[in-house]
Image: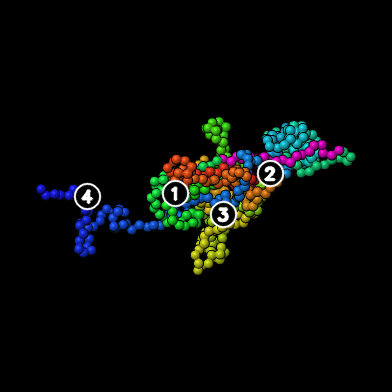
Amino acid sequence: MAGSFTGAGYALQPSAQQVPTASNYITDFNFLNQYLPDTYEKEFERYGNRTISSFIRMVGAEMPSNSDLIKWAEQGRLHIKYVNCTTGVLSNADTATFTINDTLNPNRSAIGLTAGNYAIRVGQTVVISANNGDGEYKAIVTAVSGATVDVAFYNALGITNSSAANVWTIFIYGSEFKKGTAGMTDSLEADDEIFENSPIILKDKYAVSGSDMAQIGWVEVTTENGATGYLWYMKSEHETRLRFDDYLETAMIEAVPAETGSGAVTAAYKGSEGVFYSVSERGNLWSGGAPDALSEFDTIIGRLDSQGAIEENVIFLDRAFGFAIDDMLAEQNSYGTGGTSYGLFDNDENMALNLGFSGFRRGYDFYKTDWKYLNDPTMRGQLATGSGSGQINGLLVPAGSTTVYDQIMGKNAKRPFLHVRYRASQTEDRRYKTWITGSAGGAATSDLDAMEVNFLSERCVCTLGANNFVLFED
């Protein structure tokens, strides 16, 4: 009986010549065959630089703190004006009684006044102006009781064109005392605003099993932080680290405190005050889309005049807002709307036309820069726009630093308007912690057949002088 083979056979019938035939051509490409696929060993960066961090690094700094509560004091106004004052019907009266209806500053320290912390004292001279434009008068304060202020007018017949429906603005411009009289009876204390913020803990992790680590596949990459080289399973760990770096910044921008009665508070979370929240609560909020006319910027300049009047400001904006400013500035040239201008904007007819502007001066210096976070389609880019959408078009940040009283240090200190405080002590630095656990990749901390790379940071952002910031919303 003739024998026969069973089991493994052959897949190809080699030919005498190097001619591909139906029997010797490999159609199943795998790494066990002698014919390997032609592969690219370099990773193609189709999305360019994918990270969105850099905002905090550009405008702020990082400083250690050993407390879970950061507190600081900001200067209050040097002068006080009350804009919601009322009085009875006046008809050629030499004196009048005004009631101050403005809300008291809850952070103001007691100033020893029977007027209930209203900073108007007997003997001071005041300007009294009708909010509807009926007229302006000057008077001297003769008595103060709670929120009620008695005045005697300097002009004869007092207010001649007033009605009980008028609302008045009162501010102090000086004082006058008779000869041989005592001095000012009350003292004013410095008006400080006390602010605070709490750090939050951020975590992330990357894990790879020991078996996967045993099969190495090299990929040449160029990383977002500028490093180049060959990575294998650690490529995913590297991207986890970049993603965590981004979250360290976006958490400082977007964080909000948990409100009383919220689900977060019920679950024992507290939140934190991010930049957007601080500016929307204590700063200037521009609504109605990106300003694209000089008249609108004049309105913004007027608001800055009434705040800190910081000379230099940087606007971090999305692409549409940047183009709107470019178009606005181009229109200021007589040829801007009807043709191309050479020379005035450093454009030369023999070179590429530059239609972009990096900044301009109108009362203040304004510099603009694209903020990748607002353009990135995986973050705030391409969100819904319109009234009530919360879409952010840009953020105006004052340049430089400010002086505040640091309650932890117990002295005045110069701080950037934006800076991050992270938890740290002599034995524990929680600015940026990373450690490896498991039993693979050189770690020997547990019986887990894997390597886990852990990331942790505890931090918060301090927005000093939020009244100098402008948040541009739809």
Q: Going by the picture, which residue comes out furthest to the front?
A: 1
Please say if the residues under marks 1 and 2 sit with CB atoms less than 8 Å apart.
no
Q: Nearer the viewer, residue 286 or 274?
A: 274
Q: What secondary structure characterizes most of the magenta part?
A: loop
Q: Which mark is residue 8?
A: 4
Amino acid type at image mark 2: Met
Mark 4 is on which residue type? Ala
- Measured Cα–Cα span from mark 2 to mark 4: 80 Å
Sequence order check, earlier mark of 2 and 3: 3
**Alpha carbon distance from label 2 to label 3:** 35 Å
Q: Amino acid at mark 3?
A: Lys
SS state under label 3: strand
- The part of the image, by quadrant, that contains residue 188 is top right
Name the residue beneath numbered marker 3.
368
What segment carries the magenta color?
Answer: 182-200
Q: Is residue 188 magenta?
A: yes
- Residue highlighted by disc 2: 409
Side of 103 where 199 appears, left or right: left
Q: Residue furthest right?
A: 180
Rendered image: mark on residue 236: 1
Q: Are marks 3 and 1 in contact (CB under 8 Å)?
A: no
- The local secondary structure at tag 2 comes to loop
